Structure formats: C-alpha cells, structure tokens
Image (spheres, rainbow, N blue to C red):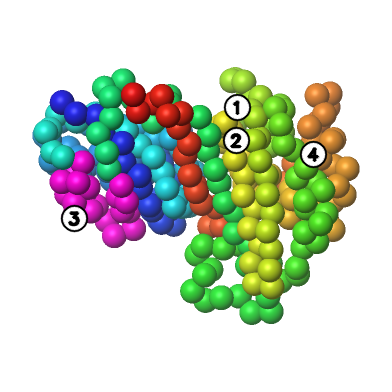
Amino acid sequence: MKNYKLILEYDGSRYSGWTRLGKEESANTIENKIKEVLKKKTGQEPEISCGSRTETGVHAYAQAISANLDCEDSPESLKRYLNRYLPMDIAVLEAQEMPPRFRASLNATSRTYLYRVAVGEVPSVFERKYTYYCFKVPDIDKMKAAAAQLTGRRDFRSFSTAKKNKSTVKELISLDIYGDAQEIQITMTANDFLHNMARMIASTLLDIGLGRRPIEDIGRILSPDDPMTASPPADPCGLFLDQVGFSPLASM
C-alpha cells in the first residue's frame, strides 16, 4: 500500500466538475475518470481526495490529489500508466510518494484560482473555450480598488450559491488584477473557497470595471446585516485552478 500525491492538468469543458453528488449527481466527473483508471490497475476502489473541488466547466493548471493505492509502483511508473489510459483532456504532470496520513483535501493550506478575460474587437475562435470574452475594456483601476476591499478574513456568504449550513468565513490572502490590450487576468488566493465564490468575485469585479455597479457595492455585499447580492457567477470557461498550496510539514 502506497500513498501518492499527483499534480493534474485538465480541460474541464466536458465534465461536471471534480465531483457531482446529491440531486445533480453525475458520473461524468474528473474524479470518476481517474478512479476508473486506478481501479483498472489495482482491481480495487481507490481512495482519492483533491485539494480543491473544481466546478462544472472549470479547468485546472495544477490540481493536487492524493491517492492511497494497493500497489507498489514508483511514482514515475504510476504517472506513465495514468497518462497512457486517461482521456487526453486529463494529464498527470507530477507524482511523488507521500506519508500514509497525507490527504490533499485535509492538508491543503491555500488554493489559487485564475480568471481569464479576453478583450478586443474580435473574439478569438481558438481561445473561446478558455476565456470569458468582453467587447468593452473594463476599468482596471476601479477593479483593483474594489479588490482591495475583499482581501482578509471575511464572511463571503454573499459570494456563494451554496446552502449556508457551514462556515462561510474564509481568508482571501491575495487578489491581483493584471491587464494588457488582449487579456485581463484576475488571480485570487484563499485558504479555501466556497461554492462559486471565485466566479462570483470575478463577475462582481468585472461589473464594477464595466460601470454596471459602483465600487461601494463591495461593502454592501460584505455587510453582516441585510447584505446586497453579488453578481451571478462568471462563465466557468475562464476559470482555472492554478495552484494548491501545502505546508512543508505535509510531506513529513
């Protein structure tokens, strides 16, 4: 029995997210595709967990997962096997053996998401699956001013569509916005994200940058008393899980 940490890259366009349970349960998930290949290898139902549960249509540059498997493969051997049998829109970039108690979901200390917005006169035919297109160039200075009000430890319940039966207080460690003539990128790092939180932050900032709502709305959305509604979740095609952070102690 070995415990592996795997770093995955995937195109989430055709999947129902990392996992889909409850009323909208689906087998067409990233998790199930990986489990199918691992079960084929070991003959047993694998125990896996992920650093961040990406939503329907969301991509990943570097998803981190742990896999506790009844096999003796070296990390490189397991990596080669998975890349041979996984669909072409899912790839294993890195693999390493971890201590038995390591779990990606429990040991992750931060998650970083990147939202990509394409701007210009003509939408790119080839980038349409991986960017949200905006004909008008948003005011980045206004977006940055609004973003500055979101960082820190706050109650983000109004930036989520999930049922509020768990704590909605999260720490948004950083929120950066970069832009040029072709693309605007919104990068956000938090200790954890609520369901649709990253997409609702992106859409609210874009609405402020496009003049659809004032900067002052951020304070009203975060208000503990009768909070204002944030903007609806931005299109998932522009969202990427960029990194999952771990404490150095996690590998000991």
Quarter of the image that includes the N terminus: top left
| Left or right, 139 with reference to 173 | right
- Residue 31, horizontal then vertical, whole percent: 33, 40
The disc at residue 163 is 1
Query: Which residue is under mark 4?
Result: 149
Farthest bottom residue? Answer: 122
Q: Earlier in the sequence, mark 3 or mark 4?
A: 3
Q: Which numbered disc, 2 or 1, marks the residue that appears first in the sequence? A: 1
> Dot 3: within a 10 Å radius of its alpha carbon, few (fewer than 14), some, or many (20 or more) residues?
few
Residue 190 shows which numbered tag?
Answer: 2
**Residue stretch in magenta:** 75-94
| CA distance for labels 3 and 2 | 34 Å
Amino acid type indicated by mark 3: Arg
Q: Earlier in the sequence, mark 4 or mark 2?
A: 4
Which amino acid is tagged 1?
A: Lys
Closer to the observer: label 3 or label 2? 2
Q: Nearer the viewer, mark 3 or mark 4?
A: 4
Name the element at disc 3: helix
- Residue 187 percent coordinates (x, y): 62, 49
Q: Nearer the viewer, mark 3 or mark 1?
A: 3
Q: Residue at x 86, y 47 (%)?
A: 215
Q: Which residue is mark 3?
A: 84
